[in-house]
Image (cartoon, grey):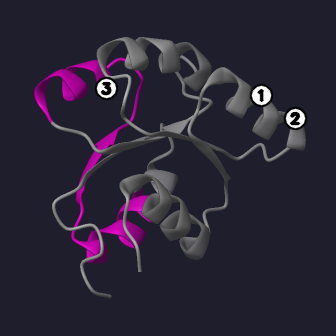
Amino acid sequence: MKPLFSGKSILIVDDDPVSALLFKEFLEPTGAKIIISYDGCSIFNIIHHQTIDLILLDIRLGDCNGFDLLPKIREINSQIPIIAQTANSLIDNYTKCMNAGFDDYMSKPIKSNELFAILEKHLGINL
């Protein structure tokens, strides 16, 4: 795969190491800088000290949830695309995520073609 997202930084926030590793495996060949946070508390330090181009935010984290984190992240950076990701793919969740202010939504298990389409859309990459 050619480096589609070279120069972009993607923050993966997921308390499930297997899911985080799968995202990383999909994204490493794209040239993106991959940063992983396994909890909601540490993401604020990351956002304050690094340039992040997009966040893949799990809705259900062990220490908090994505709905609580979203407005706090927006206070720090209102322009960063934040993609909700969840293993609970009910239609109600999609609507709830979009109404809460997420920029997009993806369900697990992760499908690489869906992931790349969402990233291309929100990182301004045209293939």
- Residue 96's disc is 1
Q: Secondary structure at mark 3?
A: helix
Query: In this view of the protein, can residue 63 be seen by the observer?
Result: no
Closer mark to the observer between disc 2 and disc 3: 2
In the displayed structure, would residue 29 be above or below residue 9?
below
Q: Which residue is mark 3?
A: 43
Q: Residue furthest left?
A: 49
Q: Secondary structure at mark 1?
A: helix
Q: Tell me where the magenta segment starts and ends, as one range.
A: 21-50
User: Decide: marks 1, 2 in contact (CB < 8 A)?
Assistant: yes
User: Decide: marks 2, 3 in contact (CB < 8 A)?
Assistant: no
- Position of residue 104 in the picture relative to residue 14 (left or right): right
Q: Tell me what residue is drawn at x 35 percent, y 67 percent.
A: 27
Give me the C-alpha separation between circle 1 and circle 2.
6 Å
Give me the C-alpha separation between circle 2 and circle 3.
26 Å
Q: Position of residue 82 (x, y in %)?
A: 47, 37
Q: Which residue is mark 2?
A: 92
Say which of 127 and 60 sits in front.
127
Q: Position of residue 28 (x, y in %)?
A: 28, 70
- Position of residue 8 in the picture relative to residue 75 (left or right): left
Q: Quadrant of the N terminus?
A: bottom left
Q: Amino acid at mark 1?
A: Lys
In the displayed structure, would residue 59 be above or below residue 44?
below
Q: Amino acid at mark 3?
A: Ile
Give me the C-alpha separation between circle 1 and circle 3.
22 Å
